[in-house]
Image (spheres, helix red, strand yellow):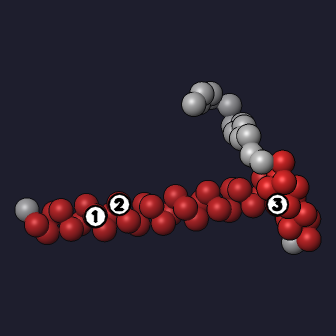
Amino acid sequence: MAKGESGRIVLEVDPELKKTLYSVLAHEQQTLKDWFVDKAQKHIEEKKNELIKSFLKVNDEI
């Protein structure tokens, strides 16, 4: 998977999924970019917390 330095993310998805997602987001008055950034930030925060807990557990075992 290519990882360039720009801020662009390019995905290839099923056309029906794309159509449905855009419909849902339009109904919610939300852009794909805003939706993606929100989901990505939440996912990163969740994983950060899991990593911190896992490091703390390892430290407790040492």
Q: Position of residue 32 (x, y in %)?
A: 81, 55
Q: Residue furthest left?
A: 62
Mark pair 3, 1: CA separation: 34 Å
Pointer 2 local density, CA inside 10 Å: few below 14, some 14–19, many at least 20: few
Disc 3 marks a residue whose amino acid type is: Leu
Element class at badge 2: helix
Q: Is residue 17 above or below residue 42?
A: above
What residue sits right under mark 2 in the picture? 51
Q: SS class of the residue under badge 1? A: helix
**Residue 57 relative to residue 61: left or right:** right
Mark 2 / mark 3, whichever is N-terminal: 3
Identify the mark nearer the N-term, 3 or 1.
3
Residue 22 appearing in the image: yes
Whether pointer 1 and pointer 2 mark residues with C-beta atoms closer than 8 Å, the reply is yes
Q: Estimate the spatial distance between the alpha carbons at disc 2 and disc 3, rounded to whole Å.
A: 31 Å
Where is 29 relative to 36, above or below?
Answer: below
Residue position for label 1: 54
Name the side, left or right, on which 17 lies relative to 23.
left
